[in-house]
Amino acid sequence: MRSVQDHLAAVLAAVGPVAPLDVALHDAVGCILAADLVARRDLPPVPVAERDGYAVASHETAGAGYESTLSLPVAHDVRAGGMPLRLAPGQSVRISSGGPLPLGADAVVPIEETDRGAARFAMQRPAVAGQHVRAPGADVRTGEVVLPAGTRLGARQLALAAAMGHGRLHVHPTPRVVLLSVGDELVEPGAVRPAEGTVFEADGHALEAAVRDAGASPVRVGIVSDDRSALREALEDQLVRADLVVVTGGLSELVGDTVKDVLATLGSVRLDQVAMTPGFRHGFGTVGAELGRDREVPVFALQGHPVAAQVSFEVFVRPALRAMAGHVELYRPSVAAQATHGWSSPVGLRQFVPATVLGSPDEGYRVTPLGDPGSPTVSALALANALAVVGEQDATVHAGQVIHCLVLEG
Amino acid sequence: MRSVQDHLAAVLAAVGPVAPLDVALHDAVGCILAADLVARRDLPPVPVAERDGYAVASHETAGAGYESTLSLPVAHDVRAGGMPLRLAPGQSVRISSGGPLPLGADAVVPIEETDRGAARFAMQRPAVAGQHVRAPGADVRTGEVVLPAGTRLGARQLALAAAMGHGRLHVHPTPRVVLLSVGDELVEPGAVRPAEGTVFEADGHALEAAVRDAGASPVRVGIVSDDRSALREALEDQLVRADLVVVTGGLSELVGDTVKDVLATLGSVRLDQVAMTPGFRHGFGTVGAELGRDREVPVFALQGHPVAAQVSFEVFVRPALRAMAGHVELYRPSVAAQATHGWSSPVGLRQFVPATVLGSPDEGYRVTPLGDPGSPTVSALALANALAVVGEQDATVHAGQVIHCLVLEG
């Protein structure tokens, strides 16, 4: 039997960031930048107005004020995107925010501080050189590293990349995760009159959401038969588009469960008993080489019960996906919380218990298990906001004991 | 001039949750449940094995133990999905996790606690009635409200819904947000030799990511000309698929900026000056009725500068989208943080400053502005993890002053 820690180490040793690729901005959302992003030119490239108003030579506005009637003739309108003009002495131009300042102008008088004149305009006070002007390079200077490799690309980082003119970015692409749910007993939810003994397929639906939440791209294949050739064919078909494969179900030692045998023919996958509950049997390895593929694809085989599958996903698959996506931080946040009451836990196994964690950093946290910790249910997990983690050496948790909890939300 | 608070109140008064719809599980990810989800049958519907092993009648195992040689003949294999069998007296069946317990059996002996025999099996100790058996209704009982209306549907909630056989869920669908970037000066990032004076389109790319991050579905239309008929046509075309429209750019008072006029012909949109910086001009209203549409679509018109557009999105559009998606919590988390040094702020305007917030709940938080708070840049915003919010009455922030900060990450 392998410890959780050893199994996780083996998993993380076998996966690495997906090979970097230039992708369009649209596809870079949520990805990790694989190389420093360097500015190719100054931003803005020329001095631009920061406000709608009038561009002026500030030294020509010295007489302006409430007691004065100074006004300047307006020669042109300059909009963003216009070509830079030359300001004739004693003149002004109307300019909109983002518009290039005319040569000879050094300040912008905001329209709200004027009489909004079209042919001439009057201002309330003298302009100060540089006011409401964004100098060339004020945002970014040519050659500057604006975003270092390792940056996660969200809205604000994409804004910067786009504003600098980058249409594609060099990133670790989002891992594509193929999900297969194995078992002749499975039927799709929504089936009108499921036969007695059939089980609704839940793992693929749940893991599709979990994969997306982890920042990867799920491909839910759906239900695959236990039949060896059907399972093998489905796996072979899907390897083309997979960076990672997760198979759920079909892991028991009974004759009809074929996942272990089929994976063995496709690559190097070992089946372990991992010292945890729920989720005792774990297949992990790589496939592809036996098929003549140029790259090995990591494969997880998880037990089919939805709680086992989801806990195993949280503990092993999610960190692997984060590593493949190039993230440095692989794990969910965790808190230490006092148990509101006690429960028992199997010695020798790490126990993961759906639980509610309440509290705050100031007042501390309290953790309450949902349902029977020895037999966690899919409904308890749906209502939980955390997994309480009880160590292998503990036979009981006593009320007041401080328990390490993985926070699933927030 | 309208206050930030009044403008936000007007926005939130004009939007409401998108009308509920039955959607497939795949499309329900991240949505808010619009009605209580009620169990239609017990889960599991029959007693099932919780472990791989042997199903037995516990009273027939009383003699088992290390000193004993008790073994039972194995009659059948029962896999998940099989029909329930009847256990003959004195016999056992091999059963896999999830398999229905035969009539007459009341316990499962895990395979790890046996000799794994095929024709007969020997066990280490007597079985206790009910051990490793999941009773009917142990997860969910018929008629029980398993997920209340208002629940956000993530992986664990979808697992429960799927396991109960629900193929579709009644949710507030994800709002579809159409993004138009207006301006003849705009060119797509990646353009090889952009003409002098052109500006790279950044708002649509940034807001596409921001909309997705807010849990809504973006449709980035891209660059639209200032030409009135082109802009009107683009808006009319997009209204069909929009629950909300965000237009960026084209808001100045100069002749070429047409957004205000075109929106006026399509519906009831007012242009306000909102007492904030960046992002001073704000269009908001609804369009559709003038076009004979059966529903009014909310429209935001935001200033084109990427920092103004993104700050305005954070302050007004994001809460509106959250409300439309059915969320109760509309706002980003915020923290109170001590300013590491001072800066000035325009009296009468609420100032939003890209900033770095560091610290922890225990030791408190510190906030440092990035760049010039009076002229926030797209690069500062890209490096920020928060927006420091300075009140309308403050002319300065002094070092040590406690500032309210919107946390943009984490």
Image (cartoon, coloured by chain):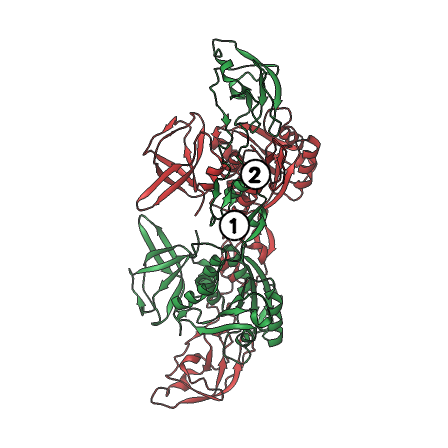
Chain colours: A red, B green
For the question of whether residue A392 can be seen, the reply is: yes
Query: Who is closer to the viewer here, B404 or B330?
Result: B330
* Residue A131 at x, y percent in the picture: 41, 76
Residue that badge 1 annotates: B30
On the question of residue A330 being in view, the answer is no
Task: Report the residue that reaches farthest toward the bottom.
Answer: A69
**What numbered label is drawn on residue A203?**
2
**Residue B3: x and y, percent?**
38, 70
The amino acid on which the numbered mark 1 sits, given as a three-letter code, is Gly
| Up/down of B251 relative to A65, above or below | above
User: Is B345 situated above or below B34?
Assistant: below
Residue type at the position of mark 2: Asp
Q: Nearer the viewer, residue A311 or A16?
A: A311
- Asked if labels 1 and 2 share a chain, the reply is no
Q: Residue at x 55, y 38 (%)?
A: B163
Image coordinates of residue B397 in percent, x first then y, are 31, 65
**Is B257 rendered above or below residue B352?**
below
Q: CA distance from mark 1 to mark 2?
A: 17 Å
